[in-house]
Amino acid sequence: MNSEEARGPEPEEAGPAPRSGKFSGKSCGEAEAVGEPEGAGKAEAVGEPRRTREAEGAGAAGRAGSASRQKNLPKGEQTRALIIETALRLFRERGYDKTTMRAIAQEAGVSVGNAYYYFAGKEHLVQGFYDRIVAEHAVAVRPVLDGERDFEKRFLGVLKAWLEVAAPYHGFAGQFFKNAADPDSPLSPFSPESEPARDVSLDIHREVLAGSRAKVTPELADALPELMWLAQMGLVLYWVFDRSEGNEKTYRLAERAARLTAHGVRLSRFRVLRPLVNEVHDLFADFLPGMAETVARRASSRGADEGGPVSG
């Protein structure tokens, strides 16, 4: 980076501090207030895909609501939103690798230093985009989580809500994948920088289970939300490469995944399968992000409820 691209002084519209890989502080139910990107909702294929039209419903609620509130945001938040929207447009037009922070700043009409004030680099800017997607998803899942108790329908509703929220970005999602697939990249869903957005998604899946009528063992209750999140990540990967009209194949995959997961939950209640459930629990407690903390938290909570000593 040359001196011209060095971070400048704090801008006059002093907004939030640079993201530094942390979640922006929005609650799960509050989508980050930004406008919809250029071309959002337009068909990627010939004609308007049916699923894209569906995105104008519950999945688009977060974007519609946030766009209407954007005018009332502090100037710093408006600048931050403008930088994100400009970056997404350039990523779509030029590709991720060929888009520089200087180009984003010029297109957004801000100084390079100002752009670096809000985002330490392109990776952090994309993390800001991830935060927005997960916040919009948290808004879009409310109808199904508030009105449905069947586990399969709740899980399927959450998966479909993500696909509907993400639909406008499908055309250039693959440009992020080659960076996200790098285990050392901040854009990896397993990276420390992605932890805040990952935690919000995990909380959604915990709510899917907790608010359902499904009866599960404590071991499965520990592991299942993490498994559901992994299933969502697999669905996202398939979605990135899915070129079927309206991503119909991805929607069918979501339906099969929800049905299969629900069958597994029901079967886990049989005593003969208990050793397998315990084995799955131990496996994912060792390898899944957040599982060890979840197990420790549940053990601590049980100890406190029983009035006994809680091990450190």
Image: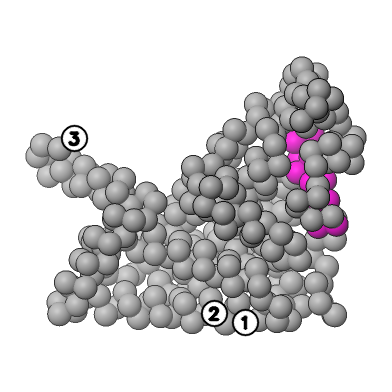
At horizontal 75% and vertical 51% (from top left) the residue drawn is 97
Q: Residue at x 79, y 38 (%)?
A: 101
Looking at the image, do the residues carrying marks 2 and 1 touch, with CB atoms under 8 Å apart? yes
Horizontal arrangement in the rendering, residue 205 relative to residue 103 (left or right) = left
The secondary element bearing badge 2 is classed as helix
At which x and y percent is residue 25?
56, 36
Q: Amino acid at mark 2?
A: Leu
Q: Earlier in the sequence, mark 3 or mark 1?
A: 1
Mark 3–mark 1 distance (CA, rounded to whole Å): 47 Å
Residue 52 falls inside the magenta stretch = no
Residues 292 and 159: in front is 292
Residue holding disc 1: 249
Quick one: SS at disc 3? Answer: loop
Where does label 2 land, which residue? 253
Left-right relation of 50 to 124: right
At x 71% / y 78%, what residue is drawn? 243
Rounded to the nearest angstrom, the CA distance separating label 2 from label 1 is 6 Å
Label 2: few (<14), some (14–19) or many (≥20) C-alpha neighbours in 10 Å: some
